[in-house]
Amino acid sequence: VKYVHKLTEDEAYTFRRHLLERVKAEEIKRVTAFNNLNAMKRLFKWLKKRKMILQNPWLEVEAIPVPKEERARTVAPSSEILPQLLSANYTHRYEFPIKEFAYGLFRTGARKEELLYLEVDDVNWETGLWIIRPKECPIKHGMKWSPKYGKTRETIIPADVLEMLKPLVERAINHRVVGYTPNKKGKMIPVDARFIFTMIDRRLSSQSQEPIYRRSDSVRGAWGALFVAAGLAEAKESSSPSTRKYKDGKKMRTDYSVPFTRHDMRRGFNLAAKEAGMSLDERSSILGHGREVNENHYCGKPKLDTKKIA
């Protein structure tokens, strides 16, 4: 099916059965199937509401049942993995600071997009005060970036992270840094910015005597490679080919069985802060969510004291 308006209800049900078959074969978890199906239902509901399609083929398709307690991920890494990540024998071939990125996620509790869109002027580098707020900067959808729900919040970047980021700040100040954003015709063009977590822009650098850096929108590959180098994950060849074309045909993708996602580092920060004595209100304020969300989704899996229960 090439066009969304030609999708039928039968094909929608077929997709649901396909997801359940993958769950049965243990290729994906039930909560993943739930999210994949729910994403399609939300998309077509959005299209129908704006009269972009006449019929919503997903309207009668039932959601995949998942217990409520399983819908939210509760995995949280321990601070013990940080030395392993920092000492891993891995360097990104285009100089993306993936070690600093992983460490910064854990120590600040920031969302991955908040770090990727971090600029030099967002932080008071003497006090460590970081104000996360809507701002004008080049992103892949336009010239305006906003944190989740558009909420402005303040947090403090720890002294060890400030020290670690110094070379990256100097790089952002002394070299040209760009972010790509679409122009009126939809073509992605480079716009100067002051992003900190960047990588070498191969196209622009080839036209210049000095390296030019650009913001990265995804760190999935570097994330997996870092965890493999640190001995915390395994790499395997994916069954689906890469979309990039090479002289010898299509290169196969690499899958990484990484135990922790970028967002898991926020839960790791929350647990470490809780053990250090930080109050629930303080942790919730730093992470930018409510008390209930923190207690239900950011405190890891509950540990039952079976002896006490007995």
Image (spheres, rainbow, N blue to C red):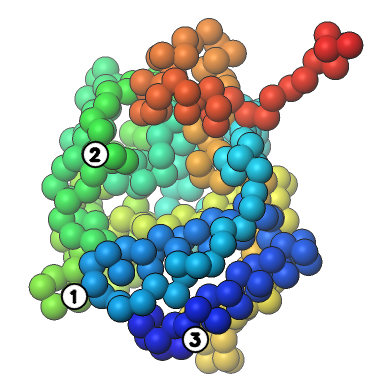
Residue 105 percent location from the top left of the image? 46, 36
**For the residues bearing labels 2 and 3, Cβ distance under 8 angstroms:** no
Q: CA distance from mark 1 to mark 3?
A: 23 Å
Within 10 angstroms of label 2, few (less than 14), some, or many (20 or more) residues? Answer: few
The answer to whether 157 appears left or right of 9 in the picture is: left
Label 3 sits on a secondary structure element that is strand
Residue sitting at x 68%, y 60%: 28
Residue sitting at x 23%, y 67%: 50
Residue 110 percent location from the top left of the image? 40, 34
Q: Which residue is mark 1?
A: 186
Q: Which residue is mark 2?
A: 150
* Residue ranking furthest to the front: 60
Q: Quadrant of residue 182?
A: bottom left
Label 3 sits on what residue type?
Lys
In the rendered view of the protein, which quadrant contains the C terminus? top right
Between residues 151 and 265, which one lies in front from this camera angle? 151
Label 2 sits on a secondary structure element that is helix
Residue 299 percent location from the top left of the image? 58, 25
Label 1 sits on what residue type?
Gly
**For the residues bearing labels 1 and 3, Cβ distance under 8 angstroms:** no
Mark with earlier residue (1, 2): 2
Mark with earlier residue (2, 3): 2
Query: Is residue 176 shown above or below 289?
Result: below
Mark with earlier residue (1, 3): 1
Q: CA distance from mark 2 to mark 3?
A: 39 Å
Q: Which residue is mark 3?
A: 245
Nearer to us of marks 1 and 3 is: 1
